[in-house]
Amino acid sequence: MVLLSVENRKEMNALRVLVVGAGVGGVSIARGLLRDGHDVTVFEQRPDTRPGGGAVTIWPSGSMVLEQLAVDMDGAGQLLSTVRIATSTGRPLINIAVDTIVDRLGGPVRMVPRRVLLDRLLDGFPADHIRCNSRVAAAFNTPGGVRVQFDDGSCADGDLLIGADGLHSMVRRIVGGAPAKSTGWCSWQGLSTVDHIAEKDVAVQIIGEHGNLGLWPAGGSDLQWWFDLRWSPDFVRPDRPIDAIRSSFAGWSELVDQVLATLTDDDLAASPFPHFRHPIPRLRRSGAMTLLGDAAHAMPPALAQGANQALLDTMVLRKALADLRGNDELASALRWYEKTRRRRLTVLSWVTSRQISQSQSVLKWVALISDSFGTWVMTAFLRWLSQRRISVSAVLCASSCRFAALADLLVELGIAALQREHGQRCPLVFPFDDPLWSWCSRNAVRARRPDA
């Protein structure tokens, strides 16, 4: 795969970008900025880029950004059609029609193992632009940009530093971001092979009074499972955690019992994962430094938005830097990116931090909500989160560049004169029923006309 796009032909001020963290957020912004013609280096404290964790949900907004990054997701994970929500007693609550969300928002919804997503993001990414075993010790602004110092005594200089180093971000501490706060819950979770999954395109979420769980197919026989329970800083991990999980969730459904029967203490070795929420920072004095992904806005996984919001950060930050006229405007561009993302992320963080588990007396009223209304609410919320104005701008810009060479050829063939004379689209010239194709080609042709 060719990573560099035709966008690099544009006249621009190429930046030396230092990205800390080689997770989904770090690699996505590095990939995007490399495509935009910048000089990007990623620093990862681990010895390699192999990810931990299970699977992530990619909603239409995330799918859109992956397409902008030229990431091929065909065959990755599991496409979903429905999210089925019920109570621990078996009472149906809401069936969210994911197919309807896909139709309205224009992108697929899939559950994909994190390792698969990262592999797709790294496909075509130059390996010499990633430096592992690089643990940040300090960073500061300099007259020429930024400098990062590592714990082995080495350092790196650049024009821009992006902290994408996760929940316990060192860059966040350096720029003065407040530490994350516990929400009082944790997840026991993992990705396992479960044979005979009856409905591989249906995600299941079950809510009880003292906990909740999710079973989301992630492709083939892979199943992402999680069991959420109360947690506190003085939590003492049981010697046999699987027994504690079974005592809390056994009997909630046949599929739940099937999964519980396959799990062992080894499957829970990395758990639990406490839920944290970051205050969304205002980085007024951070100069040429900024944050992205969980480093900026870690939040509970209630709406499965972590990877999506990191991808949306990538889209908005690329937009901010694309509009940059000179390095003297860099700090203002970064503050615009942070402000643009802050309002939506603050609302999302608040929503995901609300208590999901409820008594049956409360849940019976939730059951009165119709499936169509629940789907409409979810669709509207996802649309609001997606920064659609910026996403449309990004798509149009990418499409304009993609078809620029074709438009030039059409002009040389005299199509400009034909268009000017007839004032309509010529079917021989624009054979594809694609509004973006038509818009980009027409405007590229107009731009070359003497009377445009």
Image (cartoon, rainbow, N blue to C red):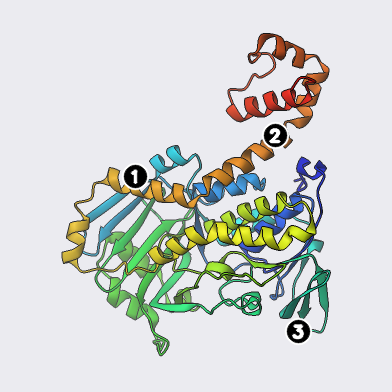
Q: Residues within 10 Å of mark 2 (few under 14, many from 20)?
A: many
Against 108, is 128 above or below? below
Asked if marks 3 and 2 touch (Cβ < 8 Å), the reply is no
* Badge number at residue 400: 2
Judge by depth and name the residue closer to the eye, 369 or 384: 384
Residue 423 on image: x %, y %: 65, 13
Rendered image quadrant of residue 16: bottom right
In the visual, does 33 lie left or right of 304? right
Q: Residue drawn 43% across and 61% down?
A: 347
Q: Residues within 10 Å of mark 3 (few under 14, many from 20)?
A: few
In the visual, does 177 lie left or right of 381? right
Q: Residues within 10 Å of mark 1 (few under 14, many from 20)?
A: some
Judge by depth and name the residue closer to the eye, 188 or 315: 315
In three-dimensional space, the C-alpha distance between marks 1 and 3, rounded to whole angstroms, equals 50 Å
Quarter of the image that includes the C terminus = top right
* Badge number at residue 151: 3
Can I make out residue 159 in this image?
A: yes
In three-dimensional space, the C-alpha distance between marks 3 and 2, rounded to whole angstroms, equals 44 Å
Against 385, is 177 above or below? below
Against 112, is 299 above or below? below
Secondary-structure class at tag 3: loop
Return the disc, 3 or 2, that comes first in the chain's sequence. Answer: 3
Residue 342 on image: x %, y %: 52, 62
Rendered image quadrant of residue 445: top right
Q: Which residue is mark 1?
A: 376
Q: What amino acid is found at the position of numbered circle 2 in the picture?
A: Ser
